Structure formats: structure tokens, C-alpha cells
Image (cartoon, grey):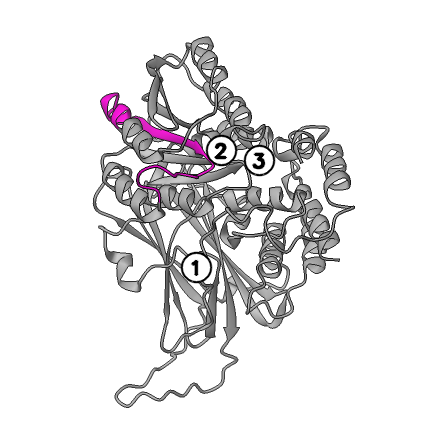
């Protein structure tokens, strides 16, 4: 297994020229000769098990509300599982979709709102009688501040991190992050195991040799007191707070907290208090076997942050170098989406993914309700499966009211509510999806993203997957790879190949 990790370390996530060869070798060595494993390699891995949304009737539930999510950890974790012949767990469809970039129009430089909203509707490939609505929110790439970064590296050095794909990969990854900083930035380093230790305090970002040396000297050992480490990291971030700048804790761990507060509920109570101070968090997951995916996702969601899983150095380069601005700088805070469906055109709908990000409809207007934050250049994509109304008369069993569909040909209206960073009052943006949103020739992005969704439905064994077929998803993804500068879409095709070989 260690050999496989070394081989896939040069995969194409960063567009390396020898990535495809590394993938081929990894598949041959780790997958081709092994049978499918119905259980994870270590039962200590933990994932959230939020139930998927069933179809909703538009006449009784015309609104669908959810918090935005830009996390991508589920995709790279799925890649790790497939490369090691493990039955996929913790698959979140929205994170598979949002791992990829799409060619949404960016906001104009003088736009009032820091994002655009686009919609496209076509027939659902796995359910020809249904339709598929793709909603895209594209954030501006303009960084909202020119002031420095105040970053605290919070690093898990407990005994569980003492594996080649954990602490050594962590050190290599943070060295890439250090290379993005300069003299206007401030870096602190906190480590935690049985106790926490401040390794560096307020070091200028251009002192790279000092910071890299501290990373290279890390050693694993002891229990995992993550809560105390979080407390110390937030205290340092508050002490060095840059007004109007980027103040952030970057937590790197396998999530296996076993000393002090350790459950997702206990840890989120701890960080919600600090999240209100303007210090954000990014969570980077490492390793396998005892990965606590549910804990790390909860920390990111409740700490105004994002969550990525680092399985290779190229994934670290994607998250910490290529996507540095979107990882570090928030342009739209507490972004919520509420979709209103038109009963004249849509009879039923189902949100695909976002199972643990759904909100009550009344929470859309509640500015005290926390939601996802969107970084510079980030995009948020969501899919709805629609059952067309087909023009039939709609009856209901209500005694005191009658639902009238009206004559509008709109499919739906997207309402997006967000706050400017640091603000307490939200702004709403409204975007209708009219009849012209439907097409029989969907875009390349639509075809590729819908292939990702279809694959996700198959892998998760969705009760509503209908005729979802990973082979068909592979064909569509391969045909819709487009320019694919970094090779990420073609890599996805090879992952479907690995899944098909395993399931055969």
C-alpha cells in the first residue's frame, strides 16, 4: 500500500506530464489483481450518514433551501479509496461536482454582487422522462483585500500521523503554502498531540527557511488533544489579527481526536464562538484507516471554512497553490440558495447532494443562521432532478385552499442570499430560469457535470438512481472532457474505469 501511495503521488491533479503513467501503474499494482472489498480497510474511519432527499411535490413543497458548499474532500477521498480497492464511503455528490471548474461567466469588475448565477435545463440521462436543472454560482476572482495574511498552521503530530501519507505529506504540502507568502504575511505554527506546542509565533512570511525547517523537524507521537490545539491556534490568530486582512487557521489532521472534546458536536461548539470573531478555518485531511471525515467536515462547516482531503502532493498543489485565493479569501459569506419551483412546469423535484447542507425554508431570510462561505474564484454548482408537470390537471386533498399553477412557463426561480465579508445583514439576488433555459443540446460543462452526478448516484446506491449507469457516465465524461488543461476530467474517467474493474 505504501508503494501505491508513492506511485499515485505524481498523479495528474496538478497537471504533471507523467501523471497518467503513474495512475496506470497504481491501478495495475493495487487494483487489477484484488477483489472488491465490501468494507473499508479499517473500520475506524467515520463518515456522516445524512439521508438523501426524496422527491418533493411542488404543490405542497414549492421551496428548496440549502447552504452553499465549496468543499472538495469527498472527491479526493473517493480517489484514494478506489486506488486502494476499497468500497467507497462518505461520497457526497455535491463535492464530486464542485471539485471541477466550469466555464460560468464571471461578474463584471463593477458588478454590485460578487457572483453571477446561471441555469441550464436538459433531459436527465438516467431518467429520460425527467429533466435535470444545473444551477451555477460563480464568484469573482478579485481578492477583496490587499492587506496581509495572518495564518496559523495547526498541525496534528500525534502518533496516528506517523505514516508516510500523513506527516511527511503534510510537511511537503505546507512547504508549498509557505512559498505563496511574503513579507506582508504573518505565520504561526501550533502542533498538538498529548499537549499543544507553539513552534513559531508571528514569523514574517518571507522567512521561508525558518518556517520550512520547523516543518521538517516535526515528529509524530502521543495522543490527540485537538480541542486544546484549536483553542491555542485561535488565540494566536486573534493576537495577530489583521483588520481587513485574511485571518485563518489551517488545520491539518486525520481527524482522530481522542483527548478532551472529540465528537463533532463538542468541537463545533468550540469553534462557533471563534468563527464569529472573523477568524476563518481551512481543514486539510490526511491519511487513511482512521480518517474521521465527519469530524473534519463539521469543523469546516461550523467554523466559516472549507475542507479538502490531501491524498497526493499534487492535490496539495491544487488546493494550496492553484486555488490559493479561493481557499484563503472569502468574497461572499453565509451564502444560501433557495429555489422556488413553478407548479405549471414542474410536478416534483429532488436536490441531488447537499444532504447535510439542507436548511429550513424560513432560515433563508434568517441572518443569524450560518451557511457556507465562498472564496475568490470559487463556483458552487447544484443539480435538481425534475419531474415535468406535462400540463396535466393537478389535484390536491386540501380542504381550505386550491393551488393554482398559473400560466407562467418558467421552470424555477433561484434566490441567492449572502453577506459581504464581515457584514451582519444579507443581500438577495434573484435569477429566474425561464423556458429558454431548457435545451436539447446541453453544454460541455453540463454533460460532464451530469456524468459526475450519475456516477455519484451509482456509487452511493441511491434509492432514486433510476437507470443510473457508471459506464454511460464514463462515456459522457470522456466525450465532454474539453480542453482539460490540468487533466482532472480525464483523471475522473480513469477513476470510473477503476470502479468498473472493481465492481466486475
Element at badge 3? loop
The earlier-in-sequence mark between 3 and 2 is: 2
Q: Which residue is mark 1?
A: 50
Q: Total of numbered circles in the picture?
A: 3
Please indicate whether residue 21 sits to the left or right of residue 296 in the image. right
Q: Which residue is mark 3?
A: 311
Mark 1 or mark 2, earlier in chain:
1
Give the mark toward the camera: 1 or 2: 2
Residue 292 coordinates in the image, percent (x, y) = 46, 44
Asked if residue 196 lies in the magenta stretch, the reply is no
- Quick one: label 2, few (<14), some, or many (20+) residues within 10 Å? many
**Neighbourhood count class around disc 1 (C-alpha, 10 Å): few under 14, some 14–19, many 20 upward:** few
Instruction: Quadrant for residue 446, please give it.
Output: bottom right
Q: Position of residue 95 (x, y in %)?
A: 50, 48
Callout 3: 10 Å neighbours few (<14), some, many (20+)?
A: many
Q: Quick one: quadrant of the N terminus?
A: top right
Image height of 174 relative to 401, above or below: above
Give the image quarter of residue 344.
bottom left
Looking at the image, is mark 1 or mark 3 earlier in the sequence?
A: 1
Q: Nearer the viewer, residue 272 or 163?
A: 163
Residue 238 within the magenta-colored segment of the rendering: yes
User: Closer to the observer: label 3 or label 2?
Assistant: 2
Span shown in magenta: 235-262
Residue 106, x across and y down, in percent: 46, 41
Badge 1 marks a residue whose secondary structure is loop
**Quadrant of the image for the C terminus?**
bottom right
Image-based side of 23 in relation to 462, left or right = right
Instruction: Check the image and name the residue furthest to the front.
Output: 222
Residue 160 — which label?
2
Asked whether the beta carbons under mark 1 and mark 3 sit within 8 Å of each other, the answer is: no
Q: Which mark is residue 280?
A: none
In this orientation, which residue lies closer to the viewer: 227 or 213? Answer: 227
Amino acid at each position: 500500500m505504501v508503494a501505491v501511495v508513492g506511485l499515485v503521488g505524481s498523479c495528474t491533479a496538478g497537471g504533471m506530464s507523467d501523471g497518467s503513467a503513474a495512475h496506470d501503474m497504481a491501478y495495475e499494482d493495487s487494483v487489477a489483481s484484488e477483489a472488491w472489498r465490501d468494507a473499508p480497510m479499517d473500520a475506524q474511519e467515520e463518515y456522516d450518514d445524512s439521508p438523501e432527499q426524496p422527491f418533493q411535490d411542488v404543490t405542497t413543497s414549492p421551496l428548496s433551501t440549502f447552504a452553499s458548499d465549496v468543499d472538495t474532500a469527498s472527491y479526493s477521498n473517493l480517489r484514494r479509496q478506489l486506488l486502494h480497492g476499497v468500497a467507497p464511503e462518505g461520497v457526497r455528490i455535491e463535492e464530486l461536482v464542485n471539485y471541477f471548474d466550469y466555464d460560468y461567466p464571471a461578474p463584471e469588475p463593477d458588478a454590485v454582487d460578487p457572483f453571477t448565477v446561471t441555469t441550464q435545463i436538459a433531459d436527465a440521462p438516467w431518467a429520460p422522462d425527467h429533466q435535470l436543472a444545473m444551477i451555477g454560482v460563480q464568484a469573482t476572482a478579485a481578492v477583496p483585500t490587499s492587506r496581509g495574511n495572518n495564518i496559523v498552521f495547526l498541525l496534528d503530530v500525534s502518533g496516528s500521523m506517523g505514516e508516510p501519507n500523513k506527516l511527511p505529506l503534510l510537511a511537503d504540502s505546507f512547504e508549498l503554502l509557505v512559498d505563496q507568502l511574503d513579507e506582508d504575511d504573518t505565520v504561526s505554527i501550533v502542533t498538538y498531540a498529548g499537549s499543544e506546542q507553539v513552534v513559531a509565533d508571528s514569523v514574517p512570511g518571507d522567512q521561508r527557511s525558518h518556517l520550512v525547517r520547523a516543518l521538517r523537524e516535526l515528529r509524530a507521537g502521543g495522543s490527540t488533544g485537538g480541542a486544546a490545539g484549536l483553542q491555542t491556534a485561535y488565540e494566536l490568530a486573534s493576537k495577530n489579527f489583521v483588520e481587513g486582512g485574511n485571518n485563518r487557521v489551517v488545520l491539518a489532521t486525520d481527524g482522530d481526536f481522542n483527548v478532551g472534546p472529540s465528537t463533532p458536536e463538542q468541537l463545533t461548539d468550540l469553534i462557533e464562538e471563534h468563527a464569529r470573531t472573523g477568524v476563518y478555518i481551512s481543514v486539510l485531511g490526511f491519511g487513511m484507516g482512521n480518517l474521521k471525515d465527519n469530524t473534519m467536515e463539521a469543523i469546516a462547516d461550523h467554523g466559516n471554512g472549507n475542507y479538502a482531503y490531501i491524498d497526493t502532493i499534487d492535490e496539495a498543489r491544487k488546493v494550496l497553490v492553484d486555488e490559493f485565493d479561493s481557499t484563503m479569501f472569502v468574497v461572499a459569506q453565509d451564502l444560501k440558495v433557495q429555489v422556488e419551483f413553478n407548479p405549471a412546469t414542474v410536478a416534483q423535484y429532488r436536490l441531488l447532494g447537499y444532504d447535510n447542507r439542507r436548511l429550513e425554508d424560513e432560515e433563508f431570510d434568517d441572518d443569524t443562521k450560518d451557511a457556507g462561505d465562498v472564496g475568490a474564484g470559487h463556483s458552487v454548482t447544484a443539480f435538481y432532478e425534475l419531474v415535468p408537470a406535462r400540463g396535466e390537471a393537478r389535484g390536491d386533498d386540501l380542504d381550505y385552499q386550491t393551488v393554482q399553477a398559473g400560466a407562467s412557463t418558467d421552470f424555477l426561480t433561484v434566490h441567492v442570499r449572502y453577506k459581504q465579508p464581515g457584514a451582519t445583514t444579507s443581500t438577495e439576488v434573484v435569477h429566474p430560469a425561464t423556458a429558454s433555459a431548457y435545451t436539447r443540446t446541453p453544454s460541455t460543462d453540463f454533460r460532464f457535470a451530469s456524468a459526475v452526478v450519475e456516477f455519484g448516484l451509482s456509487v452511493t446506491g441511491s434509492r432514486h438512481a433510476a437507470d443510473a449507469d457508471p459506464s454511460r457516465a464514463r462515456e459522457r465524461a470522456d466525450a465532454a472532457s474539453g480542453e482539460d488543461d490540468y487533466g482532472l476530467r480525464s483523471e475522473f474517467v480513469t477513476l470510473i474505469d477503476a470502479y468498473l474493474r472493481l465492481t466486475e
